[in-house]
Image (spheres, grey):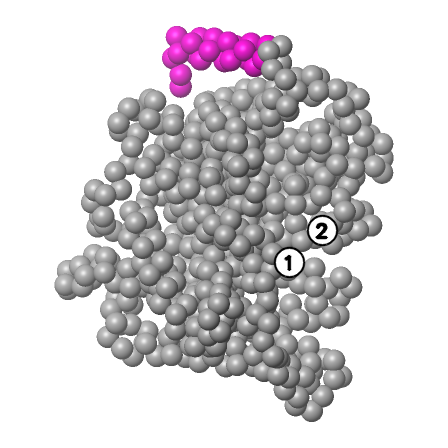
Amino acid sequence: MMERNNIKKIILSWIIIFGISASIPLFIGSYYIHLATSVFIYIALTIAIGILAKTGQVSIGQAAFFGIGAYTAAIFCKYFGSSPFVEFVLAGAVSSIFALGLGAITLRLKGIYFSIATLSFAETLLVISNMERKILGGATGIAVPPLFDNKILPNYYLSLFLAFLTLIIAYFVSNSKIGFASTVIRHDERVANSIGINPTKYKIVAFLISAFITGVIGAYFMHYVTFIVPDEVFGLHISVAILAMAIFGGIYSVEGAFIGAASLKILEEYLRLKIRYGHMIGYGIILILAVLFMPNGVIGLLTKGRKGFRNPFKSIIKRS
Amino acid sequence: MTNFLQTTFNGILTSGVYIVVTLGLALVFGIMRIINFAHGELVMIGAYITYWMFILFGVNPYISLILDAGIVFLIGVLMHKLAIEKILDAPSIDQVLLTFGFSVLFQNIALILWTANPLALSRETVSVKIGNIQFGKDRLIVFIIGVAIALILNFILSKTKIGKTLNAVSQNRTASYLVGINVPLFYTIAFGISAALAGIAGGLISTVMYTSPYVGARLGLRAFAILTLAGLGNINMTLIASLILGLSESYISVYVPQGPGWAEGVSFLIILIVLAVRPSGLKGMRAE
């Protein structure tokens, strides 16, 4: 695993980043605090998809679990009046249950089935939540009371806390047997089998963790914005953003998720102001270019230098 | 009873478009083992071409089909040459992300150019009546063209030299090189044909559905479901699977409360059920 010296360095740098993040609200206005809050939301979401991506599986319907989390929180709040923090855990649990069902069926198969199923799952939930009026509120949406009387700072610090909690979880996961197994599975499932790693089991576990975190963040988002319509949580744009952030930063690394989410969320805000329709075009371009030229993301460039680049114009087809 | 017949007929007519969309998707997947998540968006581009040709120059939508096929073929070839070709040997996660990136790109270009407003080709719609069943003439023509294209493609793939070569390439790439087949060229051709099919499908749907940046995404999901159900390499199965999806959507729309909404979930349900019942995947799509 990691060397002792390295661990110290990593922990130290995260403490510094945490310190800086915690003190930014002193210097910036409320618009930027809101922006920073959504950056932390996306950092957590991106780290969560990274845990899954490590096994070589890519979910293009992360919005499904984000939305399930948000709606679980809203429903429990509305009908049972539970405390928000109980809701967070429930939201994570419900998301995981859905992930277990979906994963048990599709993660046995290698390749693209899982991606297709996740995309289809999110789109289906979007339609259902738009239509179901009695419980979910239909297209007119659903509302919950705000956290902390809607004060901006406590909300900011909660998102900061959640993002760093996710970060810590991700470090533990990637240094645990799950992380090791994931890497082996990604490289070769046959090797994994031969050393006693059950690929399906670990893929499902990684998916559950990923869905749990995404669900919790969904619940937090619900309380942060206090009112949602289905497209805000189940919409394809969420899944797209998470994927682009992950691949841009470096899909297999926790640090990459942090860099990717922070830089692209800010870019998205900028594009949103410039382009009325279709500001997501930035994500499309980034997905394409990142896959072609830097499959290991910004982190790959930082750690490997020029080797982090893929030269797509070299050797077009190798032997199969 | 009349209602039932009408619903059945509507379902059958809808499946005609599904077939064409799915065939293009299946062609690329069968030969290169890549699922093109941007396939639906190629359909969308075809739909816009037909729409604008009609609005700007008054070109008959069925004549535009040739143009759809040509332009989208070129887009497909470009996409393949510039991007897809480079990641044929990359991990599947990269392939998914790349084609999905194209899907996002095309969708947003359409949004920027034409906003999200659904556009309708406003032509005189002629209704045909058989007994108590009534339907638009366009829907019937679309269905007939769809099935005809499926049969023509089947003929090309099984009887002509180009079809046999594609078949060889899909079975064994290395051996194809050895017998002197220009594999990269045939990959490009296959991708182009797949895109052309998407373009034609787009032209067809613009006459019977609203054209919008999202129209392709919805059809794409249906094509995934049909592909999962039908497996590869069997046009008859694709026809049957398209019928199953078209009919079940049609029945659910009519007979289930809030049906049109639930009908959108049928594709997902099909994918899930097929994968649950046949964990190794259907014919030609084994887990390895």
Q: Position of residue B239 (x, y in %)?
A: 50, 74
Height in image: B243 above or below B181?
below
| Residue at mark 1 shares a chain with residue at mark 2 | no
Residue drawn at 60 percent across, 36 percent down: A211
In this rendered view, identify the residue nearer to me: A235 or B224.
A235
Q: Quadrant of residue B234?
A: bottom left
Q: Are circles 1 and 2 on residues that touch, CB within 8 Å?
A: no
Q: Which residue is mark 2?
A: A130
Residue drawn at 46 percent across, 24 percent down: A259
Height in image: A80 above or below B204?
above
Q: Position of residue B210 (x, y in %)?
A: 59, 65
In this rendered view, identify the residue nearer to me: B156 or B61.
B61
Q: Which residue is mark 1?
A: B265
Height in image: A119 above or below B13?
above
Query: Per the image, is A11 magenta?
Result: yes
Query: Per the image, is B139 magenta?
Result: no
Height in image: A255 above or below A283?
above
Secondary structure character of the magenta stretch overall: helix
Q: Disc 1 residue type?
A: Gly
Secondary element at image label 1: loop
Q: Chain of mark 1?
A: B
Q: Chain of mark 2?
A: A
Q: Nearer the viewer, mark 1 or mark 2?
A: 2
Q: Which residues are magenta?
A: A1-24
Residue drawn at 68 percent across, 31 percent down: A221
Residue A81 relative to residue A129: left or right? right
Residue A123 relative to residue B28: left or right? right
Residue A311, visible in the rendered structure: yes
Q: Position of residue A171 (x, y in %)?
A: 50, 21
Residue furthest toward the bottom?
A: B131
In this rendered view, identify the residue nearer to me: A241 or B56.
B56
Q: Disc 2 residue type?
A: Asn
